[in-house]
Amino acid sequence: MTSWKKAAMAALIGFSVFSTAAHADAQKGIKLYQKNLKETCGMSGAAFAAKFKQAEWDKAYKAGTLSKKMTEACPKGKAFFEGDKYKKVESHLYDFVHEYAKDSGNIPSC
């Protein structure tokens, strides 16, 4: 019985660490948006992420066309979305827009 409790506690701690790491990427995406795109796009991060539904962001990411989808949401940010820095932070921005998409029910703090 004691070993079962230990295994359950270890699993609980493991899941909590995993969920925190998954949430951290969306938070990093928010910071990246605020720093690099908020002024250029002229809209809040909430408005930017809510341009499309989760399935639309997901489809673009999986197809490798996320930069085009983001350019569609913010045409003035085209230079950023086509630059080298974007390629390094694409996954964080994806996590951000997917987490706060139109149909997610979540609202970012930016």
Image: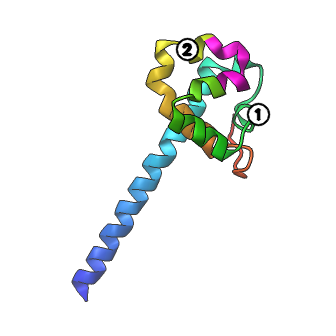
Q: Position of residue 35 (x, y in %)?
A: 60, 20
In the displayed structure, 104 sits above or below 33; it is below
Q: Position of residue 7 (x, y in %)?
A: 27, 75
Farthest residue, direction left: 3
**Residue 70 vertical placement versus 3 (above, below):** above
Regarding mark 2 in the picture, which secondary structure is present there? loop
Q: In percent of the image, x 59 and y 40: which residue is there? A: 59
Using the numbered discs, state the Cα–Cα distance from disc 1 to disc 2 in whole angstroms.
21 Å
Amino acid type of the residue tagged 2 in the rendering: Glu
Label 1 residue SS: helix
Relative to residue 87, is residue 69 drawn left or right?
right
Most common SS among magenta residues: helix
Segment tinted magenta in the rendering: 70-78
Q: Which label number is shown at residue 82?
A: 2
The residue at 61%/45% (across/down) is 99
Near mark 2 (Cα within 10 A), the count class, few <14, some 14-19 or many ≥20, is few
List the single residue furthest toward the front.
63
**Residue linked to disc 1:** 47
Task: Report the quarter where the C terminus lies.
Answer: top right
The picture quadrant where one finds residue 5 is bottom left
* Location of residue 105 in the rendering, given as x and y in whole percent from the top left corner: 73, 52
Kind of residue indicated by mark 1 = Ala
Is residue 50 located in the magenta-colored stretch of the structure?
no
Left or right position of 83 against 7? right
Q: Quadrant of residue 61?
A: top right
- Residue 77 on the magenta segment: yes
